[in-house]
Image: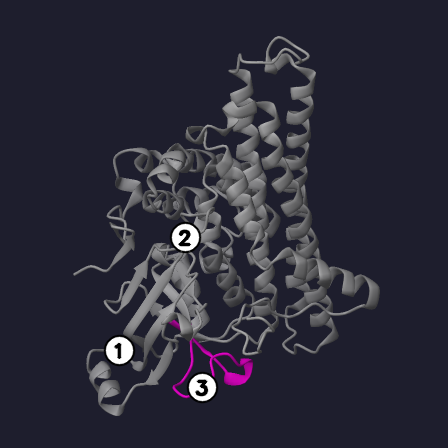
Amino acid sequence: MPDTTSTGTTTHPTTNPTSNPSSDAGPAGQLPTFEELRAATAPSGPTDAQLAAHFAPVFAAVAAGAAQRELDHELAFAAIEYLRGAGFTRVRLGREYGGIGASLPQFADLLVDLAAADPNLPQALHGHFMFTEQHENESQGAVSEWWLAEVAAGSIFGNALVELPPSTGRRPVQWIDADQDTVQAAAATGTTEVARLTGDKFYSTGAIFADYLLVSSVRPGQDTDQEEAGPIFAIVDARDPGVQRIDDWNGFGQRLTASGTTTFDHVPVRAQRTQEFNVPTGVLAYTVLWIVLTATQAGIGTTAVGEITAFVRGRRRTYDHATAETPAVDPLVHQVVGSVSAKVSAARQIVRGAAAVVEESYRQVRGHTDLEDPVVVQAHTRANIALSEASLVVSELILDATNQIFETGGASATDASKQLHQHWLNARTVASHTPLIYRTQAIGAFRLNGTIPPFHSTARNSTATTPGA
C-alpha cells in the first residue's frame, strides 16, 4: 500500500504519478529540459540571460495553477516535476558534478522568480539546496559523492530535523543499531543496513516532495534536549514503507510547502548514509537557507505588485474625495504603487548582493577545516551578518509593501477571491523563521562589541522553568 499524506479528510498521494515530465502531455512536455540547459551553457557557468530564458516558461507553467492550488489546498507535485525536469534542482550543482554551476547571486535571482510564481516552492526545496551546498563545498567522502551523484541524476532531498516536545505525544526519533542477524540478512541482498529509525518529526518542510530525507536521531537513553547528546544525522529513502509524510502544517501562510509531520517506523539506514555538521561550510549552509527565505519574500512582493497593478487598471469605482476620475489616473494611487514597486525592486537587489557575500565566504573558507580558524570565523561572521541584515530589511520592505497595496482599492481589494491578502500572510509567515528580533540583536552586538554571531540557528525545546508557565 503506497504511503500517503493527509490533510483533514482529504488524502493525497506522496508521489506524483508524473515521473517523466519531459514526455507528458500538457505544459511539461513543452518545457525546456536540464539536458538542453547543460548543452547550451559553458563549463565556466551560465549567463544571467541563459538562465532567465531557460526558466521563464518553467516558472510560467508553475504560476499557471498556483492560485487554484492555494484555494484547493493542493500540493504542487506537477510543478515540482517541471522544476526537476528543467534542471532547477541542480542549477547550483557544479559542472564537474553534473550540474549547471550557477553562481549564488544567479541562484538568488531564480529563487525570486520562482517565488513570484509560487512562494511555497523555494521554501519547500530549501533543505535540498542547503545541504547540497555543504556536501559540494566540504566533502565528507562516500556520503557526499553519493549525495551529489543523486542530485545530478535529478533526485530531490528534504529534511526532517525538528521535533515537538514529548508532552505533545510525539516520539523522539531514535537510532537503533542493527543486530548482527539484520546486518547479515541485509548483506545477503546486496545492501548494508546499520540501523533503524523510529519516531516523529514536525516542520518537515518539503519532505512530501522529496526522494530522500535527512533525519536527526539519538540513541535510546540520550537526552534529546541537550546539545551534547550528539544527534546522528541519517539519510533515508523517503519512499520506504516505514515513512509516512502528513500534510498537517496549519500556518495561516505558506500553507503548501509540503511541511508537517513525518513519522518513521523501523526505517532502515544504509551504511555511509550519515552526515556531519561540524565543518565550516556546514555552518555557512545556514545562510543559504536565509537566501532562500529572503528571496521568497522578494518574490512574494513581485507578485503583489503585478496583481495590484492589474487590479487598479481595471477598477472603475472611486470616491468623491479622490483626485481623479479613476484609480489608474489618480496621483495618490500612483504614489502607493510607486512606493510598493520601489520596495520590491530594492528587495531583489538586496537579496542578490547578500548572496554575493555568501559566495565569497565559501571561497574564503575552502581548505580551512577548523571552526576556530580566524579565516573561518571571519567568513562565517561576514556571511551571517550580511544575511541577517538582508533578512531584516527585506522582511520589513515586503511586509510593508503587501500591507500598503490595500490603499489602492478600498474594501474591494479585500475580496477573498482576489487573494490579495495571501501575499501579506505568506510574507508574515516567512518572516517568522528564526525570528527577526534575534537577528537584529546579533547585528547590534556585533557592530557594538564585535560579538561573533551564533554558528547555528536551530530551535530546541528548553528545559528551563519559566515563571508563569
Q: Residue at x 60, y 69 (%)?
A: 456
Placement of the C terminus among the 4 image quadrants = bottom right
For residue 200, which quarter of the picture? bottom left
**Sooner in the amino-acid sequence: mark 1 or mark 2:** 1
For mark 2, what is the residue?
Answer: 250
* Residue 467 to residue 256: above or below: below
For mark 1, what is the residue?
Answer: 191
How many neighbours does mark 1 have within 10 angstroms: few (below 14), some (14-19), or many (20 or more)?
Answer: few
User: Disc 1, disc 2: CB below 8 Å?
Assistant: no
Disc on res. 41: none
Question: Is 155 situated left or right of 361 in this image?
Answer: left
Residue 116 in view, yes or no: no
Question: Is 422 situated left or right of 350 in this image?
Answer: left
Residue 136, horizontal then vertical, whole percent: 52, 64
For the residue pair 326 and 439, the one nearer the viewer reads as: 326
Going by the numbered disc 1, the residue's amino acid type is: Thr
Front tag of 3 and 1: 3
Residue 295, horizontal then vertical, whole percent: 57, 46
* Residue 240 to residue 51: above or below: below
**Sooner in the amino-acid sequence: mark 3 or mark 1:** 1
Name the residue at the right extreme: 448
User: Disc 3, disc 1: CB below 8 Å?
Assistant: no
How many neighbours does mark 3 have within 10 angstroms: few (below 14), some (14-19), or many (20 or more)?
Answer: some
For mark 3, what is the residue?
Answer: 222
* Start-end of magenta stretch: 216-235
For the residue pair 281 and 294, the one nearer the viewer reads as: 294
Residue 230 drawn in magenta:
yes
For residue 369, which quarter of the picture? bottom right
Front tag of 1 and 2: 2
> SS for tag 3?
loop
Residue 303, horizontal then vertical, whole percent: 53, 33
